[in-house]
Amino acid sequence: MTRRIEIVENILNANDRISTINRSILDNAGVFSINLMASPGAGKTSLIENTLALLARQLQIAVIDGDIATDLDTQRAIRAGAIAHQINTGGECHLDAKMVNEALIKINLDKVDLLIVENVGNLICPATFQLGTHKSVLVASIPEGDDKPYKYPGMYRGVDALVINKIDLLPYIDFDLTYFKRGVEILNPGLRTFELSCRTGEGLEQWVAWLTTEINLVKASAL
Amino acid sequence: MTNFTTGHPTIHGILSSVSDMHELSIAENILDIALRHGEQAKARKITDLYLVIGDLSSIIDDSIRFYWDILAKGTLAEGARLHFKRICAQLRCTNCGHTYVLAGEDFSCPECMSSAVEFISGNEFYFDAIEVET
């Protein structure tokens, strides 16, 4: 006998369940966490290095680094003063909640104020997988072109903050910032946006100020 | 990627070296859900799977099919047919109320050119039903 069974279940239920566990681990430890996503070369690791340079003296920062094969980015984070943990995804194009969960267990979160999860460089897949972090942050950069929100709507729709990096290159590249921002506004109205340059340091203070506010909020609610 | 218990390459390792795509993890999730419901229903065989996928969710049907045949082999769901119901990305203009389907690069309302628009569909990503033989 053939019968139909109605399911109506989110396909990524298993991932989402683990991401909820990750969030409570982080909440209980009072650790503010971000999922940093971008295409390769947008400047995720540079942003992490600059953030560490500005915050590592007063705060303990941990970095979980997702990479397909190498640990170069992890080495850069350690040199900049972070506790860093490497996840080699073994070919997978994104991090998922389970990989982050396994990494969280290995980090002593008691001492940590901020956790940065550096996702695999990719504008498609990481948007689909919730990790349990407090905020999802997308790093865009001027050389990538102003059409990216229109080409990758899924990514731009799913984030809580946007960093526009390499803003110092605007005079040299045909990048229509108004056109870019119009796409972002449609996909994600009112999205918190930071225009900065990791090379010149311009705009970094607003970014760091936002992180500090969020770190304090999460810490206060854990007490 | 190698399974350290057996020393053999895992199916995940073999497949992900064929193609680095998130459809593999998604196909695994689909199989898990199907098997759980199939076993609950004491099915002899799972014959059909019905999935609803929005165009904004960046999932490619053919890639899921590619992994599916390999992953489902030897399970209750071996040979099951996958049915994808695609939901297009629909927008509504908050200025004039016009509803339209996302086409091409520009999101603006084709009627009044306003960019004050909102998405009303396209993010769907769920399992609707399975058909089983009991």
Image (cartoon, coloured by chain):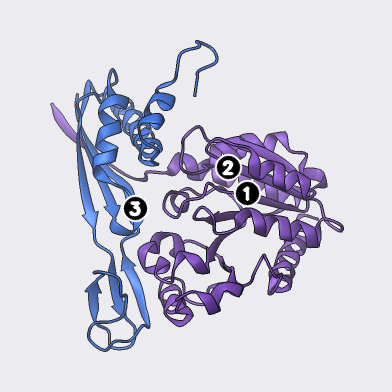
Among the chains pictured, the one given blue colouring is B
Q: Are marks 2 and 1 in contact (CB under 8 Å)?
A: yes
- Checking the image for residue B120, the label placed there is none
Which residue is at a point 39% across and 22% down the rendered structure image? Answer: B11
**Picture quarter with the C terminus of chain A:** bottom right
Judging from the image, what secondary structure is the residue with disc 2 in?
A: strand
Per the image, the residue denoted by label 1 is A117
Q: Nearer the viewer, mark 2 or mark 1?
A: 2
Per the image, the residue denoted by label 3 is B58
Per the image, the residue denoted by label 2 is A66
Give the CA distance from mark 3 to mark 2. 21 Å
Residue situated in front as seen by the camera: B112 or A195: A195
Q: Amino acid at mark 2?
A: Gly
Q: Within the image, what quadrant is residue B74 found in?
A: top left
Residue sticking out furthest to the top: B6
Query: Is residue A5 something that shows in the picture?
Result: no
Q: Amino acid at mark 1?
A: Val
Judging from the image, what secondary structure is the residue with disc 1 in?
A: strand
B72 horizontally vs A32: left or right: left
Callout 2: chain: A
Instruction: Count residues near mark 2 (Cα–Cα under 10 Å), then give few for <14, some for 14-19, many for 20+.
Output: many
Give the CA distance from mark 2 to mark 1. 8 Å
Image position of B56 with respect to B99: above or below: above
